[in-house]
Amino acid sequence: MQTVDVVVIGAGPAGTVAASYLKKQGYNVTILEKETFPRFQIGESLLPCCMEHLEESGLLEAVKARNFQRKTGAAFVRGEKKCEFSFEEQFTKGWTWTWQVKRADFDNTLAEAAKAKGVDVHFECEVLKVECSADKQLIEYKDINGKIHQIESRFIIDSSGYGRVLPKLFDLSKPSAFSPRGAVFSHLEDKERTEKAGNNIFVHSFDDNKSWIWAIPFSDGSTSVGIVGNKEKIIELAENGGEKYKKFIREFRDLEGRFSDSDFKFEPRHILGYSIGVKKMFGEGFVLSGNSTEFLDPIFSSGVTFATASGLLSAKMTHKHLQGEPVDWKKDYEDVIQKGINVFRSYVTGWYNGDFQTIVFASNIEKGIKYQICSVLAGYVWDETNPFVKKHDSILQTLAKVIRMDEKDFKSSTVF
């Protein structure tokens, strides 16, 4: 039986960040990944905050070498109204740019970089059974040939994403409070792309705030285009090879004909009911990271940032634990990650109930407020010196109420 210090389940961003950090600390780390890489995945627009996590785990230079599409901001569009955010104009001092990536290439780059650092990465290995205790964890998995293996470790980090290995095995999942939604998407040829459109993610709102379109440009001249809406709408758009989705994308007014003559790189795909939570993020001998913890909604592109943030923090806490230091997993891990999730939860709620859109599409938005919101959109959701982080559970509702009461005479001083 193979024996290692740490087994990481999943070779996505959370898993490779965690494994690479622990390898830097001198641990023997094995990643077990169910799929083969490269493999398709959505979540293609990163946030500047995740650059810090890639850098600290030693993976940033490998990603830089791929020359992915640079992302410098985000733009929200609703009819004639548009609000653009530049990451150079934000409240929190941090990274001012990041990337738009095809996840097949991005995730594979991270996995190969982790392997180059000495992490033992096994693809097409399905975890079947896990037994945990205070000092010894036993994992049983099946390889591509159907052969059963066992591996013993001192600790497990579950970064299995949508696979949610330990939440399923240990009955840790809980339903999301959000309404069931879905997404239908494809990659399209983008011959009409402008320079500004190349450096931003564009989000187009429609259907009374209930639905929206993403447009995420890539460095090869193609663009990811997806529609998010309630499950019934997505099922209808995805039927018959996504014919209604294709027609909608080509004719949607706010896209201004950008994809009217575009070829689709693959037949549209869809996912449903992606929002989900967990009862707890840790247990005896293991911790959850990435989408194994909780996934909210794709509207603010927070998925990869939470993956890298939780992957890095889970690795740091695991390091302390393996060194024999006391670790308060609830206070120093779960509560920290949950705090960031709760901030974005408020913004997701504000998007769909209209509060956030009322603010960003206001005729006059004060620069200081815009900079503070921009830092949230950049992923700096743990910076409590930012009022739009510290007061996340009330500030959007309060500000939107003021704007609605008197759009023309709105002054930021009336909020604080």
Image (cartoon, helix red, strand yellow):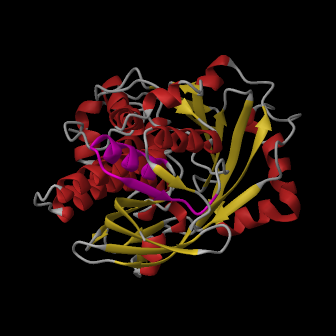
- Quadrant the C terminus occupies: top left
Counting from the top left corner in percent of width and height, residue 127 is at: 51, 72
Which of these two is toward me, 416 or 101?
Answer: 101
Counting from the top left corner in percent of width and height, residue 59 is at: 43, 35
Residue drawn at (54%, 41%) of the image:
112
Which of these two is toward me, 325 or 227?
Answer: 325
State the image quarter where residue 408 is shown. Answer: top left
Q: Is residue 265 left or right of residue 128?
A: right
Counting from the top left corner in percent of width and height, residue 35 is at: 62, 60
* Magenta region, residue range: 13-35
The question of residue 231 being in magenta is answered with no
Q: Measured along the vertical axis of the image, is residue 229 above or below residue 80?
A: below
Which of these two is toward me, 56 or 336?
Answer: 56
Residue drawn at (33%, 38%) of the image:
380
Counting from the top left corner in percent of width and height, residue 308 is at: 40, 46
Q: Residue furthest left?
A: 326
Task: Tell me if residue 353 can be seen.
Answer: yes
Residue drawn at (67%, 26%) of the image:
219
Q: Measured along the vertical axis of the image, is residue 299 above or below residue 380?
A: below
Q: Is residue 238 left or right of residue 334?
A: right
- Quadrant the N terminus occupies: bottom left
